[in-house]
Amino acid sequence: MFCFRDSLQDIPSTCQRKTGGPVPVTEAQLKAIFKQCDTNRDGRLSKQELKKFFASLRSHLPGWRAGRVLRHADGNEDGYVSEDELDGLIKYALRCGYTRVVK
């Protein structure tokens, strides 16, 4: 059976995806990951904690990403991304297009 239709509403159920697919990570999810990766609970992420942050997003080369985001989001250049600088981290991660798989 061919499944070529003009609109998504016309797609028969036999042609629709049965399992979930990748869905973009939301800002709220990134904030939750920030809190999980802040292992010493000081309200900021070190380069090592940022590496865990990007590893949890299944990033390729999470250490490289951690260095890039420090240069991008660390406004006071103290070597950490604090909660005040969290917006820069989130914008960077959203631009990278990380996804999660919905089943």
Image (tube, rainbow, N blue to C red):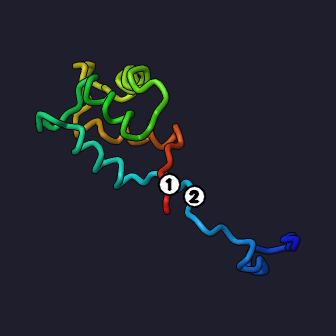
**What residue is shown at x 27% (from left), y 42% (from top)?**
34
In depth, the one of 3 and 77 nearer the eye is 3
Quick one: SS at disc 2?
loop
Residue 57 bears which disc, if any? none
Q: How far apart are marks 1 and 2 (CA)?
A: 5 Å
In depth, the one of 58 and 98 nearer the eye is 58
Is 7 left or right of 78, judged from the image as shown?
A: right
Q: Name the residue under label 2.
A: 21
Q: Looking at the rendering, which quadrant does residue 35 occupy?
A: top left
Q: Earlier in the sequence, mark 1 or mark 2?
A: 2
Amino acid residing under circle 2: Gly
Is 23 left or right of 6, judged from the image as shown?
A: left
Amino acid residing under circle 1: Val
Circle 2 crowding by C-alpha within 10 Å: few under 14, some 14–19, many from 20 = few
Indicate the quadrant containing the N terminus: top left, top right, bottom left or bottom right.
bottom right
Q: Which residue lies furthest to the front in this view?
A: 1
The answer to whether 67 is drawn above or below residue 38 in the figure is above
**What residue is shown at x 45% (from left), y 51% (from top)?**
25
Q: Looking at the rendering, which quadrant does residue 8 occupy?
A: bottom right
Q: Where is residue 79 in the image (x, y as percent from the top left)?
A: 25, 19
The answer to whether 66 is drawn above or below residue 100 in the figure is above
The answer to whether 62 is drawn above or below residue 29 in the figure is above
**What residue is shown at x 33% (from left), y 36% (from top)?**
53
Is 54 left or right of 7, judged from the image as shown?
A: left
Q: Where is residue 20 in the image (x, y as percent from the top left)?
A: 55, 63
Label 1 with label 2: CB-CB less than 8 Å: yes
Is 48 left or right of 29, judged from the image as shown?
A: left
**What residue is shown at x 85% (from left), y 73% (from top)?**
6
Q: Name the residue under label 1.
A: 101
Q: Where is residue 45 in the image (x, y as percent from the top left)?
A: 23, 31
Quick one: SS at disc 1?
strand
